[in-house]
Amino acid sequence: MNKPVSMLREFERRDAAEIGRDLHGFAASLYPICRSITGSGIRQTLAMIQDRIPLRIHEVATGTPVFDWRVPKEWNIRDAYMKAPCGGRVVDFQQCNLHVMHYSIPVHATLPLNEIRPHLFTIPDHPDWIPYRTAYYKEDWGFCLTHNQMLELEDGDYEVCIDSTLEDGHLTYGECYLAGRSSDEVLISCHACHPSLANDNLSGLAVATFLAEHFTLRDLRNSYRFLFIPGTIGAITWLAQNRETIGRVRHGLVLTCIGDAGGFHYKKSRRGNAEIDRAVACALRDCGESSEMLDFSPYGYDERQYCSPGFNLPVGCLMRSVWGTFPEYHTSADNLDFIHPEQLARSLRLCVSVFDVLEDNRSYLNQNPCCEPQLGKRNLYRSTGGDSIDDEIHARLWVLNLSDGEHSLLDIAERSGLPFATIHDAAELLCENGLLEEIAVRASTL
Ligand SMILES: [Zn+2]
């Protein structure tokens, strides 16, 4: 077993470029799969994640009531195309799985172009991109194509074929549980229901999978639960199935859109000042990249479900560019070129630093609180005189001063402006020298 202390330090010893290439390579291997909220695409995706981490696959039958919803019918697709009057495929699912509106009901007919037009979707502002469209909760069919493709369509009768099935089946999701010393859980959730879209879906899947790999076989304080689920209905289903044990979730993070070139954005939990919100803020402050904190709103990804008033779990959402705000969002331009190995690696590093805070945040009591202890005689102060002291010495003084039983290490990192890892190192050293003792109870801020 590895010591859990400072996973970040250990992570930093690894080759970041290689980690980035591996993350991008894993996303690339998942990219061609035609995922949807149910069906063989999400199963295939979960099987590939299962090759890397211990993943339990759950199947929930169509029609199962989950709060105000029901598990939908299962959708599978083999082929889809529009054939021109002269016979060639002008829109072809085999070339790109975005060409069909997801959850399209089966159709096979020959129709004049003007009757097909209401079923065609394009992006006039970006005439070379294919939009991503879905029809999950209404039975409909459609094709998505580039605007330039549509402009080239000639009048006449087209054969339209969507070889899909929409039948009773199952909703599939994956769950990786890594037991720690405490039953307190950290929930990491990402959606696995988008087809060939890289930033929105694959970046989160790749980073979450590698995080779970990084945690495997470690001696962890918290238990970690990774969910790979279809968006919205997957989170609702998981919450419905785990209602009795939901109180174990002490911290949570939804990961999405974390591979693009943008700076970080963190959407706070509904509570607004949960430990996860503060841990992410502290990690972002120290990560050396631009970042912005966003207040909670009841729209977005699955934090909406986790933060619904009946649960109000401390779950935030970590992104780079915010979903819906970048032009490539939900289009064929959200491809493997839109996500970058180095950005994925930095996102993974940030997550490790956040979970380092959750693992190592403790409270201590100064054993020598009446005036400063003499650090010099314990070799804990600089050996030569001078005007300035470095961060390590500052951290020791801050930890000694604020370890009065009222403050956790996260409190001290926030107040001192020093990196959490530096504060934690100082606390370890002061403990070894008998100047500090850990308080058994968790800090009141937890
Ligand atoms: Zn999306």
Image: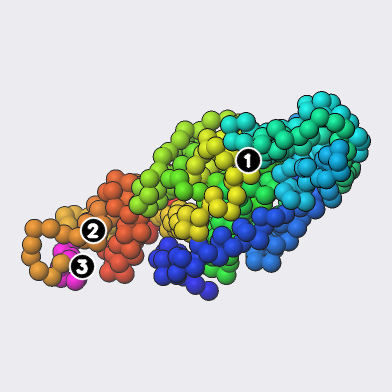
Give, as a single range, the part of the protein colored magenta: 373-381
Q: Amino acid at mark 1?
A: Trp
Is residue 5 something that shows in the picture? no
**Nearer the N terminus, badge 3 or badge 1?**
1
x then y, percent, for residue 48: 70, 62
x then y, percent, for residue 284: 40, 48
x then y, percent, for residue 104: 81, 38
Q: Amino acid at mark 2?
A: Asp
Toward the bottom, the furthest residue is: 1
Vertical order, 332 against 50 (above or below): above
Is residue 163 something that shows in the picture? yes
Which residue corresponds to the image point at 62% horizontal and 59% vertical from the top-left? 28
For label 2, the crowd category at 10 Å Cα-Cα, with few meaning under 14, some 14 to 19 and many 20 or more, is: some
Q: Secondary structure at mark 2?
A: helix
Q: How many numbered marks, from 0 up?
A: 3
Task: Name the residue carrying label 2.
Answer: 391
Question: How much space separates mark 3 and mark 2, taking CA atoms?
Answer: 13 Å
126 is within the stretch colored magenta? no
Asked if the residues shown at circle 3 and circle 2 are in contact, with their CB atoms under 8 angstroms apart, the answer is no
Q: Who is closer to the viewer here, 208 or 179? A: 208
Q: Nearer the viewer, mark 3 or mark 2?
A: 2
**Nearer the N terminus, badge 2 or badge 1?**
1
377 is within the stretch colored magenta? yes
Task: Name the residue carrying label 3.
Answer: 380
Q: Secondary structure at mark 3?
A: loop
Q: Nearer the viewer, mark 2 or mark 1?
A: 1
Which residue corresponds to the image point at 40% horizontal and 51% vertical from the top-left? 283
- Residue 223: assigned label: none
Task: Name the residue carrying label 1.
Answer: 129
